Image (cartoon, rainbow, N blue to C red):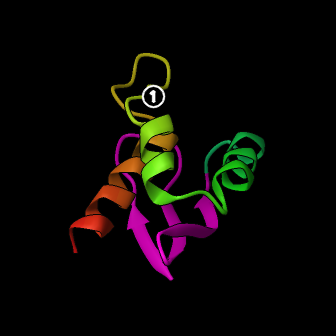
Amino acid sequence: MIEYKTEGVCSKKIQFRIENGILKDVSFIAGCSGNLNGISKLVEGMRVEDVIYKLDGIKCGARSTSCPSQLVKALKEELKK
């Protein structure tokens, strides 16, 4: 399980797995429960590259980031490894 500590959002961290380029078992710790559970369900089973393409650059209100953007940041970091 990969764990990513978020920055600038209500969620404290994101946990997920990547198997053969597919995103699995996504969960956000803290934050807007309904929205984040929905995002988790929508992206699970998707190719990592597709998740990055769809969620990159999303902002939350006046913030420069969002929970979906933080997931993208975590995925990009994992792809670099």
- Which residue position is annotated with label 1? 58
Report the quarter where the C terminus lies.
bottom left
Is residue 4 placed above or below 72 in the rendered structure?
below
The answer to if 45 sits in the magenta stretch is no
Q: Position of residue 75 (x, y in %)?
A: 38, 59
Q: Position of residue 64 (x, y in %)?
A: 33, 26
Q: Amino acid at mark 1?
A: Ile
Query: Along the line of sight, which residue is nearer the eye, 41 or 27?
Result: 41
| Res 62 quadrant in image | top left
Residue farthest along the left direction in this orientation: 80
| Res 5 quadrant in image | bottom left
Side of 24 relative to 4 (left or right) = right
Q: Residues within 10 Å of mark 1 (few under 14, many from 20)?
A: some
Question: Magenta residues?
Answer: 1-30
Query: Along the line of sight, which residue is nearer the eye, 59 or 56?
Result: 56
> Tag 1, which secondary structure?
loop
